[in-house]
Image (cartoon, rainbow, N blue to C red):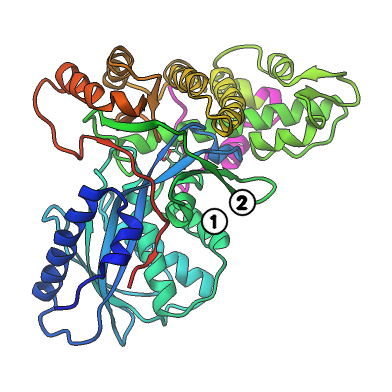
């Protein structure tokens, strides 16, 4: 039976116990493949794509502002064989997932909402659109995932990245990895959530020992930042499911739309005041910050701080659709068509409590500043101050962005009481995980205390674990 060499596994699973388990895992995977595809005699290939945590910079990516994630050794691995036609046949080692079987076509029809098949199709559609052909080699595959589902650790992006990488490799498509990251991120919107590009980029480009500062403007680029010395990030799952293709989708898309509406109002204000600036994303505000300071300059507004600008533009916390249309001097119909259309072409329905433009905007801009500070602190290994920033970020996500939940807040409190120097939710929120920054010498007692206080009973290592950074997605062997 074909197997994966130790030196390959060693590159991904630097943690000893994960490495040992990975050998058993790959063995099971190959057995699973033989069961699903008993007559397959062609050579097998192996791929992996990691999940991630994000240290700071939450809900900034779709605003064109940076993020700081780490690729982690919780990943999806695939064993595959190339087909001679353009069919995709894919099974999962977990029996909760149906077997997938479809032929590539110019426009792939969606599977039912919530199905994992949509992520596989999103990846295939991305490659079809990029190459301009659906006449690509398909594959038979079995995959296995150690990324907890709906936990904010990017299991869906890892799947999309994995499938894309397989197709790119099998069809010998030449594409730069940054462009690929961008394409996969855009392609994943097929599933209906207007996500940014953080998850796909880190899954593709992760680097051991480092987080990546991912900048989206003026164009996608990444900067490795060394992880703090003598400290670890510990993941704790709140066990509240945050299914991005399910209930969370509406809440997430709402934030994206609220940020778009803020941009429209700021742009309008600036234009009226004689400053011509196209503001598609809040990150475009970078263009009007004078170099080296956060001072804001326009023809008429002198040396105003960016937050003064926000206070000038956004006079109240929450806006009705009719308020916004009136300010922009357009009809609500035009406004809807321009700003409220979702990736699946549906119209976003106005929330009963209005669009909470001011708190959302303040979170995003302050989170950006926190991220830049965090990168500087990491370079100095100033972990105490970094920890404080993580907590500030969490509080802002809870209060201004409203993406936390009682369970996450409870975990944050318990983590702080158990010795973490900083803690926050990671990923989109609405459930999922928190990450705690903990001194290495205290990790054991920290985990024991959190287990006792939050989980009350024993939990396995998918629920609470120490993060080990790893390499980005690719062919292993
Ligand atoms: C999800 C999205 C990312 C990002 C985070 C929030 O993980 O997929 O693009 O927006 O939420 O920071």
One can see residue 110 in this view: no
What residue do we see at 70% from left, 38% from top? 284
Q: Secondary structure at mark 2?
A: loop
Front-most of residues 70 and 366: 70
Left or right of residue 346, residue 31 in this image: left
Q: Secondary structure at mark 1?
A: helix
Does the magenta segment cover residue 2?
no
Residue 323 position within the rendered picture, expressed as x and y whole percent measured from the top left: 61, 20
Look at mark 1 in the image and give the residue it sits on: 182
Image quadrant where one finds the C terminus: bottom left
Label 1: few (<14), some (14–19) or many (≥20) C-alpha neighbours in 10 Å: some
Say above or below: 359 vs 258: above
Pick whichever of labels 1 and 2 is earlier in the sequence: 1
Residue 432 position (above or below residue 130): above
Dots 1, 2 in contact, CB < 8 A:
yes
Q: Which residue is mark 2?
A: 220
Q: Nearer the viewer, residue 85 or 470?
A: 470
Write the start and end of the magenta stretch as one range: 326-351
Closer to the camera in the image, 200 or 341: 200
**Magenta stretch holds residue 348:** yes
Q: Which mark is residue 399?
A: none
């Amino acid at each position: 039976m074909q197997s994966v060499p130790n030196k390959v596994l060693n590159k991904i699973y630097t943690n000893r116990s994960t490495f040992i388990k990975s050998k058993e895992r790959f063995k099971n995977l190959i057995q699973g493949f033989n069961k699903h595809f008993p007559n397959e005699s062609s050579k097998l290939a192996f791929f992996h794509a990691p999940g991630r945590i994000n240290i700071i910079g939450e809900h900034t990516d779709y605003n064109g502002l940076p993020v700081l994630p780490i690729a982690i050794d919780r990943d999806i691995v695939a064993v595959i064989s190339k087909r001679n036609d353009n069919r995709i046949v894919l099974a999962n080692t977990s029996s909760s997932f149906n077997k997938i079987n479809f032929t590539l076509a110019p426009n792939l029809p969606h599977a039912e909402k919530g199905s994992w098949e949509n992520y596989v199709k999103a990846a295939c559609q991305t490659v079809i659109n990029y190459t301009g052909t659906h006449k690509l080699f398909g594959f038979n595959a079995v995959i296995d995932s150690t990324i907890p589902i709906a936990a904010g650790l990017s299991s869906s992006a890892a799947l999309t990245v994995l499938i894309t990488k397989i197709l790119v490799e099998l069809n010998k498509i030449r594409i730069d990895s940054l462009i690929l990251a961008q394409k996969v991120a855009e392609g994943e919107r097929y599933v209906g959530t207007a996500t940014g590009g953080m998850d796909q980029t880190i899954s593709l480009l992760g680097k051991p020992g480092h987080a990546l500062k991912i900048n989206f403007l003026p164009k996608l680029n990444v900067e490795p930042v060394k992880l703090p010395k003598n400290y670890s990030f510990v993941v704790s799952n709140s066990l509240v499911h945050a299914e991005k293709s399910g209930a969370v989708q509406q809440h997430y898309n709402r934030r994206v739309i609220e940020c778009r509406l803020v941009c429209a109002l700021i742009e309008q204000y600036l234009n009226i005041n004689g400053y011509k600036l196209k503001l598609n994303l809040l990150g475009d505000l970078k263009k009007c910050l004078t170099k080296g300071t956060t001072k804001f300059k326009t023809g008429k507004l002198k040396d105003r701080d960016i937050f003064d600008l926000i206070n000038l533009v956004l006079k109240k916390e929450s806006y009705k659709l009719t308020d916004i249309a009136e300010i922009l001097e357009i009809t609500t119909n035009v406004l809807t068509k321009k700003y409220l259309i979702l990736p699946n072409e549906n119209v976003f329905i106005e929330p009963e409590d209005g669009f909470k433009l001011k708190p959302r905007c303040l979170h995003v801009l302050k989170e950006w500043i926190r991220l830049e500070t965090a990168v500087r602190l990491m370079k100095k290994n100033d972990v105490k101050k970094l920890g404080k920033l993580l907590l500030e970020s969490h509080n802002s996500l809870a209060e201004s962005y409203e993406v936390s939940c009682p369970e996450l807040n409870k975990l944050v409190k318990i983590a702080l009481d158990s010795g973490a120097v900083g803690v926050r939710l990671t990923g989109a929120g609405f459930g999922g995980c928190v990450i705690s920054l903990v001194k290495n010498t205290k990790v054991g007692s920290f985990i024991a205390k959190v287990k006792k206080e939050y989980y009350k009973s024993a939990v396995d290592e998918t629920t609470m674990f120490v993060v080990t950074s790893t390499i980005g997605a690719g062919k292993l062997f």
